[in-house]
Image (spheres, coloured by chain):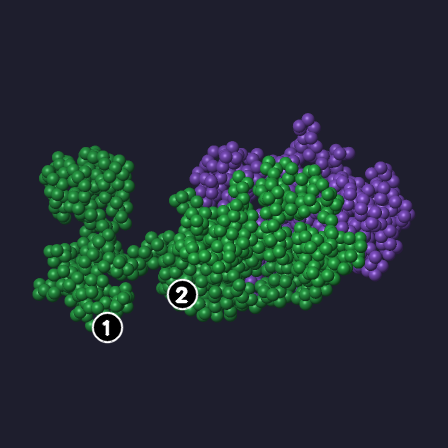
Amino acid sequence: MSSIRALALDLAARSDRQLRTLLATRPDLCHPAVPDFPALAARACTRISLQRALENLTRPQLDMLAAVVLSTNVDSGTAADAATLQPLLRPASGRATLKELDGYLAGLHALALLVRTPPAPSRRHRAYLPVTNLDEVLGPYPAGLGRPYQVLASSNPQTADRLTAATAALHRAGYPVEPMATGTDAAAELERWLADPRTWPALLSEAPEATGALLRQFRRSPVGAVPHAGRMPEPGSGATPVDWLLARGLLVPLDAAHVELPRSVGLAARQGAVAEPWLTAPPQPDAPREIRDSIRDNAAYSAVADTLRMVTGLLDQVRSSPVATLRAGGVGVREARRLAEALRTDPADAGWLLELAAAAGLIRLDVDTSRWVAAETDFGALPRHLQWQLLAAAWLALHRAPALLGEELPSGSSINPLAAEASRPDAPAVRRRLLECLGQLQQSWRQPAAARSGTSPAISAADAVAYLAWHQPRLQRRFERLVPGILAEAARLGLVGSGALTELGAALAGGGVEEAAAVLERDLPAPLAHFLLQADLTAVAPGYLEPEVARELALLSDAEGQGPAAIYRFSAGSLRRALDAGRDGTGILDFLTRHAATEVPQPLRYLVEDTAARHGTLRAGPAGSYLRSDDESALEQLLADPRTAPLGLRRLAPTVLVARAGGRELLQTLRGLGYSPAPEAHDGAEAGSAAHPDMVFSGPARTGAALPGTAAGREAGSAPAGTGAASFPVRTNPWAPTGEQLDQQLALLRGSAAAGSAAGVEDGPLLGLETLRTAIRQKRPVRIGIVEPGGDEHREVLLPLSVGGGRVRVYDPDRQTERVVPIHRVMDIELAEPAAPAGAQTTKERAADG
Amino acid sequence: MADGPLIVQSDKTILLEVDHAQADEARHAIAAFAELERAPEHMHSYRITPLGLWNARAAGLDAEQVLDTLLSYSRFPVPHALLVDIEETMSRYGRLRLEKDPQHGLVLRTSDYPVLEEVMHAKKIKPLLGPRIDAETTVVHSSQRGALKQLLLKLGWPAEDLAGYVDGTPHPIALTESPGTGEDAVPGRDGWRLRPYQKMAAENFWAGGSGVVVLPCGAGKTLVGAAAMATSSTTTLILVTNTVSARQWKDELLRRTSLTEDEIGEYSGALKEVRPVTIATYQVLTMRRGGLYPHLELLDGNDWGLIIYDEVHLLPAPIFRMTADLQARRRLGLTATLVREDGREGEVFSLIGPKRYDAPWKDIEAQGYIAPADCVEVRVDLPRDERVAYAMAEDADKYRLCAASETKSAVVEQLAARHRGEQLLVIGQYIDQLDELAARLDAPVIKGDTSVKERQRLFGEFRSGALQTLVVSKVANFSIDLPEASVAIQVSGSFGSRQEEAQRLGRLLRPKADGRAARFYTVVARDTLDQDYAAKRQRFLAEQGYAYTILDAKDISKA
């Protein structure tokens, strides 16, 4: 009977309760719902479902399963029962009882991994067969045993030759082995020879000394790397254990560098047992290091305070200067180093903080600029336990392994913070498992006496991995890779202190982030609203400051040092920063007096007053152009003229006005209004009549646009040194603009000036970028003026797709291709007519699809 | 953990809240392993360094005690990484020991075999070692005792020196303490007694063998030296910074011990006497002639039983090299601070010895033995033309222009008028400026070209009170023992190095009889280099615990 059908019958015969248990432990069986038992059985035998089921088996269960697979034969119907399995599964001491074995078998049967054979009168115990595919899912080396000689012989002709040669050599050396001609026969002969219970002890007694140790190395995997594996030493000359085994066909070469220990040899080396020892209980470390609870809590709470402080610092930093990403994704080394420097820590730490902040949604990737920017959150204002709760919850659910940052990739580069390479979808599950494991270990290892004396066991990464690997041996590698990092991260969040699980960690392991946060709320000191001011111009906050106070203090001074107490140093520079931000001397002193636990020291008071009194002696501000006249009334008249409003005129001094508009626009507008302003050159001299007055402004801009890279290619209006008509770089230009071109240029400039009325010189590029972004968002085509490398300029209608890093990616509907245009080649940008022709509509859609 | 006086930072500093009820206890506890870095009025900061931790180990403290101290006095959780680091660092001291073996002489012994292996494989250490005796012991060439200790410290495995000392030539020395006649010294009077902390320092030193005693300026380090000499009662070599200091030592020893004039020799540029107690200057010992140090044999040509190094933090590098060869003699270092501006703290530790006693400055101040001066910075506005001149001046001339501004003179006059009747010193760098000030104040000037005789006459008059105002140049204040004053006004120049500045202030300015603190004025031109320097001075002085005030020149009368 097919195994699936047998399983179907078996399942059909189970009680509802049993089925419910089965489906609860293997939920993939009913998701989506199955129509009938045969379907359920079929699904239970799929490789993927079996794999999932096996992942949740413990070490003894898996050993048991391997033993069943090894000792049964589905084709011939040879089933296994407790009695046949007893010699295969040998606990560390004594023998496994039949009852115990039956219990394990029943457990595996309940999981639908084994099928019960019909009861036979000759058996006292129930016999079982593995379900279909189980042997495949267990892999070629169940329980770390090699393949049988037969399989090896048929795997490749060289191995088969080796086996026949081995029988011949053994025969010559006087062992009771007949030389065989074919690989299959040789394999059978070797099996027969090794099956004799006297063979192995006799062999071992003549083996070189280190053979036992060598064989033990094959426990976990039967395949080993050996130089010159293909050599064929004579049985007599076996000097080294490897040679000795190779000469007798007990180790079989697979290729020039690898050997395999055949199954029967492996079994013989384990005294016939599949699992030796068969570990029915999780491993216990000999003497877990006991950590005083005070030390543990100290470590945990200092870590929590540290992490929260650093995250807050990171957010401030990101807010003031967003973090650039690499084109390949992730944050580059240089950027991480910059952050680390600002946070007074090392780049590895900065990487972890970035990951944590990103996980908690405190920073987000701005897709327009490809930079990480601070998200609008109220994180800074939250009480600290809630900040922690946010971070801890985010960390638990994080599908990444930040501990892998900095590891080298096969390509030679290393994993960068926030790069895709650190993504590990199984990380949340491993974290959960680890926390549970820590909780269980804490419970089981904690001696009653220790609990009374206020100590807890420290759990090392190796211990945790061993424990987890006993529970889920199939995930061992994953645990080995992730657990050390996760433990380190847990320590940063205070879940583990000095290696021991803390109250926070226990609460979180129990599944309650809120409970954990409540524990933290109880234990964290309340924030302070005061600090100490000292005559060396420092403020020391003896603890965690209220966020608002801290923010104000950070504005007034520069933070230094690293630790629970923040030290701020006042200087004229830092105070000027605060004054620039709109504070005034009295306000600053009020703030200091209000929040200082001590008097404001005289030198500090002096510094504040002195700096405030002298702040603003020089004042700077933006302007597009200026207008001056010795005739004050003329200026007054201009100011009063409502038609000059678009120019944004403002009076700075009786004889000086500034305009928001650029110089050219100012001139043109004023001329349009009937005034006759004379343009002034850079050094204040009146631009002579030799050149067209407009050239003062337009000349350099024109050449700059035409010849990117020349010194003149800066903003319009700032003529290079040595102005005057004769020295205009226009004259040196290899091609002279024709009058027509000039006219077009002027018309263009006029047109744009009229359109964007108050667009100053500085705003031009920004407006262009904004137009571009708008177009990208609205998927509208733009008309872009582009300068070719040769200096030619042309304009075309293109559909922009994205902008960033100094480039625009555009779709060219005419050529139906995508292109990348460097921003510095873009002269101007305007939205194409909103009423796009039908053709454009389709190209837009095509582009969107592409 | 709830409310201790300490805050332990992750950058290895400890903040101590001075006004906390437990502050004194905590201060004593941490002084054993951390160095005081800054002492402004409310929060003192200490730094934990490997040397400090090893000093603590040498004093018999173990990591457990240090961690306990931190944990029990700390207000907040102590950064765990720091605790681990402390434990690790402290466990490194004493794994290697220098011992005297009856058979093999000087040996390096370890209880931790791999450590010995590690250091024996260090390239620089190999030549210093003799044959290996067993897995845990190796012979050391006895001449290399100092060099080996230095190198081991650099490797991070400081050796504990248990090899003992030579006795030296005995020579009876006794302190002339006369108990019962008052608590402390009034110089020149008969009755005096060692202050308790001085006694403790000397005892700690003697018990430890060799090492450094840290006492603030004015706390009577000389007496600690005298007490150590009395305990040793052997011939003694005293190394001091300069001749002035040598004379002070001599006077003090004559006054406080049974030694007579004939027993004390001075070994300096002027005199070359070698007597049972010899006081030599660093300068003469480090003098080089033709690539040789002609006076070096003073150190090892005599069988000294004790060598005292005054002002260890100023010890010049050649002396270190020489000291490396003197490891079999007892060495006492005296200093106000273990922080050296050249960063050679490690050599002090390995060659002279670990810190044996450290009296927190605040304690001694609280006991009334020393008093810090009041510092006042007076800012003057430069007149318009001087500002323009300053703005246009070359960098090299800028300081002179602003520091020697004439506007300062008026301010000095005002200040002098305010303190009429008190002993007042005016200190400056530029001779023209000093001459002008002297004329205005009608006071004599002491500068480079003033004869020694004239100087001594003026100082004598100043001390006796016959002369109340004295103008001195920088040259003068370097070379001569300045008399004490209650008011000092500095118009230009810096007062020695940063470190010296505070020390000189402490020595120069004694509290007035009525207990008011002495005053130290600096007159500073606003918005100039002068002010930048003043900012640094302010930070340093404030960190040293001096009261600091800033005034505008026009507010002097109000202050």
The residue drawn where x is 78% and y is 42% is: B393
Shown in green, the chain is A
Corner quadrant of residue B303:
top right
The residue drawn where x is 40% and y is 46% is: A409
Quadrant where the N terminus of chain A lies?
bottom left
How many residues crowd mark 1 within 10 Å: few (<14), some (14–19), many (20+)? few
Q: Which residue is mark 2?
A: A509
* The one of B17 and A345 positioned closer to us in this rendering: A345
Decide: is A769 above or below A23: above
In this image, A416 relative to A233: left or right? Answer: right
Q: Secondary structure at mark 1?
A: helix
Corner quadrant of residue B13:
bottom right
Shown in purple, the chain is B
- Residue located farthest toward the top when viewing the structure as drawn: B290
Say whether residue B539 is visible. no
Q: N-terminal of the two: label 2 or label 1?
A: 1
How many residues crowd mark 2 within 10 Å: few (<14), some (14–19), many (20+)? many
The residue drawn where x is 14% and y is 60% is: A2
Residue A130 place in picture, x, y as percent:
18, 59
Residue A127 place in picture, x, y as percent:
15, 62
Amino acid bearing label 1: Arg
Amino acid bearing label 2: Ala
In this image, A431 relative to A627: left or right? Answer: left
Q: Which residue is mark 1?
A: A17
Residue A637 place in picture, x, y as percent:
76, 60
* The one of B383 and B331 positioned closer to us in this rendering: B383
In this image, A721 relative to A173: left or right? Answer: right
- Residue located farthest toward the front when viewing the structure as drawn: A740
| Foreground disc of the pair 2, 1 | 1
